[in-house]
Image: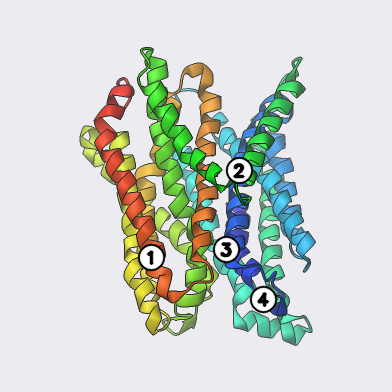
Amino acid sequence: MWERFSFYGMRALLVLFMTLPIAQAGLGISAERAAIIYGTYTMSVYMMSIPGGAIADNLLGSRLSVLVGGLIIAAGHFSMAFPTEEMFFLGLFLVVIGTGLLKPNISAMVGQLYAEGDTRRDAGFSIFYMGINIGAFLAPFVTGTLAQHSAFKRLLAEWGFNPDHSWHWGFAAAGVGMLLGVIVFVVFGKGLREVGPPPVRVPGAWRNTALTIGGTAALWAFVALSDRPGFTWLRSVYLLGPVALMLAYGYRKDIELRRLGAVFYFFIGALVFWAIYEQAGSSLTLFADRFTQETFLGIEFPSSWYQSASPAFVILLAILFSVLWTKLGNRQPSSPMKFTLGLFALGASFVVMIPAARLTAEGRVSPGWLLAMYFLQVVGEMCLSPVGLSTFTKLSPPRFVGLMLGVWFLAAAFGNKLAGVLASAFGEGDASNLDAFFSQQAIGVFVIAGIFLVLVPWVKRRMGGVL
């Protein structure tokens, strides 16, 4: 909960702070460049999960990796509490490194709490998932209030501080959240001493870890190259590469290899989904800041607060969907169909924003538009996200499960990067072009969802009986 508090608390402020004019103590970066930086940052967090898992498996163990990762994350947030551009980017770097160590290994520790076949495992992960979303829900209210709310700015002025530096108080609050998480982990984690211990050192452990880090660095460099003028065509590889792998494996005779064709179908679906969904911290935050009413029911409503909408809907809908799938039993949609339904809900979320975009010509619009959009996106998430990881593990050859979990993280990484690329088209938010921004992406998602619908029978055959 506290780690997600820190992550989402900072995430809610990043693009807003980067685009804030220098005269107001921001970085004065254009919205287009800020979206690209944000996409690279969120991509890096997911991509670092791969070497983070390798470091735990070969060197530190899950428990120590989580502890070290949490301390590095806290150091990153506290670095951003200092009002300089250098400390801001140092903080982002540290959060990426720390989250790469913590994110995959805390999930592994939850799994290691239960013996094979223990019926409490799913309930344990449900508690874990609820903690994640409680942290994500609370964080924007806390950090957003410190960074943006006029009442806190007045309080800073009364204390003799520069109110323009309120953003750094928000970043510091995210660090406090992570520090609280580390304290809870150490003080109340006595029962975890036997969970995720350091592995037995074997010859070549360092070499395997170094190769994983080197491979991830090379992949990151490839993505960074795609942002440079003349190399933006490389972005097409994010989507066309998985399509080629889906087709290449999908027609193999060996059942294990043929199932990999289905794996890359789900990879593409996840990538497309996160490319739209993860604009919550970039283009959608800018829409909230520049085009949405600043009060709600007479209360000042900072734009960063909207980041709490998705986790709130997740907490609500996760319960409803779990009941729905249980009641449907064998009549519930197949995994490929759930992915397809998730993509259609995602496309519908941007359709909702088209009339909202047109209404901005008359002034700031109602918060209801953004809330309706986030609701539809979470409906899509409930159809796609919980299914994806489970299906990946079931379809992967037993000897490659760890590798395929890394591939799942790559889908999220590339999706986050594409979210930054797509959000860069938002620019400075010209009201006359906003409807085109949302409609073009909605059409693109609907086209892909239609293709996914057609491919459902083909994918089910490739899954070889896996549900």
For mark 3, what is the residue? 32
Q: Earlier in the sequence, mark 4 or mark 1?
A: 4
The answer for how far apart the CA atoms under marks 3 and 2 are is 17 Å
Q: Is residue 445 left or right of residue 198?
A: left
- Say which amino acid is labelled 3: Glu
For mark 2, what is the residue? 223
For mark 1, what is the residue? 436
Residue 262 image point, x, y percent: 37, 28
Q: Earlier in the sequence, mark 1 or mark 3?
A: 3
Q: Earlier in the sequence, mark 3 or mark 2?
A: 3
Q: Residues within 10 Å of mark 1 (few under 14, many from 20)?
A: some
In front of the other: label 4 or label 1? Answer: 1
Q: Earlier in the sequence, mark 2 or mark 4?
A: 4
- Say which amino acid is labelled 4: Pro
Residue 255 image point, x, y percent: 37, 15
Q: Are marks 4 and 1 in contact (CB under 8 Å)?
A: no
Name the residue at 55% across, 26% down: 403
Name the residue at 50% across, 46% down: 415
